[in-house]
Amino acid sequence: MTIPSVIVLLIERLNQEFEQIEQDLFKGLALVRHNLSFFPNNIILTQYFAYLNAVTLAIETYRRQLQAINEILSPQDIPDEVLQEAGEDLGLLLGRVLETRIAVGQIINRLESIS
């Protein structure tokens, strides 16, 4: 059985979201470093810096999860239950990734407003 198109689309969407978040993280970390150079004792900026670094690690974890799901889906004869579970896992992962992207975007907006 081939992988259903909806699962392929979820995988592609997750990869796109990972790329976008990584670009946002690069921008966010640059902004927070810039602001920390002016306000080194600012607790909120320090928290943003820590959060953005934690998100960097989370994205790596999410990528590994996606890779593991891809490996599960690689055999030719995949039972329907495995496909369903993989689809559910991908949906949950997409939810977490979208929440993360929104949170990173909010931090970037705040950082841009003070720069």
Image (cartoon, rainbow, N blue to C red):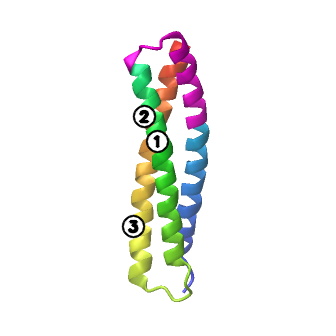
Residue reaching furthest to the bottom: 77
Identify which amino acid the numbered label 2 is placed on: Tyr
Could you tell me residue 51's position as x and y percent? 42, 34
Q: Which residue is painted at 51% across and 17% down in the image?
A: 36
Report the side of 83 relative to 1 (left or right). left
Which residue is label 1 attached to? 55
Q: Secondary structure at mark 1?
A: helix
Q: Are marks 2 and 1 in contact (CB under 8 Å)?
A: yes
Q: Nearer the viewer, mark 3 or mark 2?
A: 2
| Labelled disc at residue 51 | 2
Q: Which residue is painted at 49% across and 76% down in the image?
A: 72
Classified by dominant secondary structure, the portion drawn in magenta counts as helix
Q: What is the span of residues highlighted in magenta in the rendered image?
A: 25-43
Which residue is label 3 attached to? 88
Identify which amino acid the numbered label 1 is placed on: Val
Sequence-first disc among 3 and 1: 1
